[in-house]
Image (spheres, grey):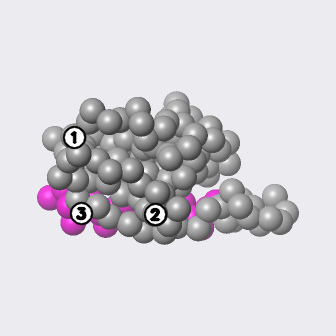
Amino acid sequence: MKNILVLCTGNSCRSQMAEGYLRHFAGDKANIYSAGIETHGVNPMAVAVMKEDGIDISHHTSNNINEYGNIPFDYVITVCDNAKENCPYFPSKAKMFHQNFTDPSKKIGSPTEIKKAFIDTRNEIKEYCDHFVQMELV
């Protein structure tokens, strides 16, 4: 079974969504973890828009990358440029992937505009995760 880490800045939105979709698409083919180079708590809007798509991430916790030093990761996926640039070194043979997704928590606007930003990012992450599993976990 493969070990996959999704890494973001605060482990609150993008990496949480990616963890949820990777768990969904990978099933029992992989252990999925997410972490941040900081911890900001799981964003309630991320939980809400994922629930709308049938994925429950309400039980997720915001974790720091330092908590996973002893796990031999096969894949590390950074989902924001800041995490890629500040990603700590892993003493493993992890295959690195990077896809910068817009941070919906930074959106300024009406509640409708903010929710749309979360949905747009969620949909991009869903497509990426589905493709990742199809290409890497065959």
At which x and y percent is residue 117?
67, 65
The span shown in magenta is 118-138
Q: Which residue is mark 3?
A: 134
User: Height in image: 54 above or below 133?
Assistant: above
Residue depicted at x 54% and y 52%:
9
| Amino acid identity at mark 3 | Gln
Residue depicted at x 50% and y 46%:
36
> Of circles 1 and 3, which is in front?
1
User: Height in image: 22 above or below 102?
Assistant: above
Residue depicted at x 35% and y 35%:
68
Q: Which residue is mark 1?
A: 72
Q: Does residue 46 appear anywhere in the picture?
A: yes
Residue depicted at x 74% and y 64%:
107
At which x and y percent is residue 122?
54, 60
Query: Is residue 49 toward the left or the right of residue 71 in the image?
Result: right
Quick one: SS at disc 1?
Answer: loop
Quick one: SS at disc 2?
Answer: helix
**Magenta segment: does it hold 40?**
no
Query: Is residue 109 toward the left or the right of residue 4 in the image?
Result: right
Instruction: State the quadrant of the C terminus.
Output: bottom left
* Mark nearer the N terminus (2 vs 1): 1
* Mark nearer the N terminus (1 vs 3): 1
Instruction: State the quadrant of the N terminus.
Output: top left
* Mark nearer the N terminus (2 vs 3): 2
